[in-house]
Amino acid sequence: MLPAGLLFSFLLALARVSGVIAFLPMPGLRNAPDMTRVVVALSLTLCLAPAWPAASSEIPGLITLTFWMLSEGAFGLMIGLIMSVVVESFQMGAQVLGLQAGFSYASTVDPGSQADSTVLQVFAQLLASSLFFGLGLHRELIALLAHSFTTIKPGTFVPTLATAKVIIDFAGVIFSTGLRVAFPVVALLLLVDISLGLLARIQAQLQLITLAFPAKMLAAVAFLGATLWVMPSVAESAFHKALEAAIQVVGR
């Protein structure tokens, strides 16, 4: 017969892991069938079995167990939210870039939110999510989760002002990373606009308005493709900042 203490340890670990899975930047996971997300959460929880909190011989009451589950869920959601901020920063950069390049006139369905988004936004989301796993950062996240069972005992996590300050300070990564993604192409598009403006002043008979959008779109796509090799380093830097923020929340 399964001991009650071991069952409670499993439930608390599952609540913490499920909170992280809810915001984990995994392509297609948010809109995957419920059974798929349940299997992912259960599999990761079982993988962390050696790090589960020690089973208690005392059986907690219903109110105490509910509070513990809410505490664990809130902790997992906070860690998952920190990791998803990096993906949002890439999307913000793509939004700035798409607006300047003229891609805002065409939209497609975002596979993550099922909402209309520009092509570059969808591309940036999939790129950042793929780099999260391609750079092996998911292993560091799993190690952090295993360490969190030691530093933060189940049911003891309570959000504080220090925790809120860490998250608010980290939120600035959205703007810094987004600008790093978009600024090189936006600078090129500014040069294209200046060139077209000078040509229009020199030769007023040229109808450059019809050429502006195609030229800017082609220049944006070409230069973005030429600068893709720097995206892994940008994503790695941003994800490491996210892990550092998560470590501050978890504690060493």
Image: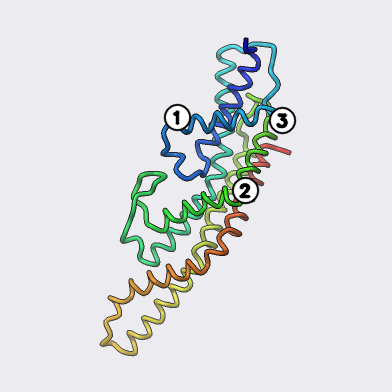
Q: Spot the residue most to the right.
A: 252
247 up-or-down from 126: above or below? above
Q: Position of residue 68 (x, y in %)?
A: 59, 22
Residue at the (51%, 44%) spot, across then down: 25
Question: Mark 3 against mark 2, which lies toward the viewer?
Answer: 2
- The residue wearing badge 1 is 35
First in residue order: circle 3 vs circle 2? 2
Q: Position of residue 201 (x, y in %)?
A: 33, 87
Residue at the (67%, 26%) spot, across then down: 52
Q: CA distance from mark 1 to mark 2?
A: 25 Å
| Left or right: 72, with 124 as reference point | right
17 up-or-down from 98: above or below? above
First in residue order: circle 1 vs circle 2? 1
Q: CA distance from mark 3 to mark 1?
A: 29 Å
Q: CA distance from mark 3 to mark 2?
A: 23 Å
Category of crowding for the residue at label 1, using alpha-carbon neighbours closer than 10 angstroms: few (below 14), some (14–19), many (at least 20): few
Question: Mark 3 against mark 1, which lies toward the viewer?
Answer: 1
- The residue wearing badge 2 is 136
Residue at the (61%, 17%) spot, across then down: 7
Q: Are marks 3 and 2 in contact (CB under 8 Å)?
A: no
Given the image, on which type of amino acid does mark 3 rest? Thr
| Left or right: 247, with 114 as reference point | right
| Left or right: 197, with 47 as reference point | left
- The residue wearing badge 3 is 150
Numbered disc 1: secondary structure: helix
First in residue order: circle 3 vs circle 1? 1
Q: Position of residue 203 (x, y in %)?
A: 31, 89
Residue at the (59%, 16%) spot, across then down: 64
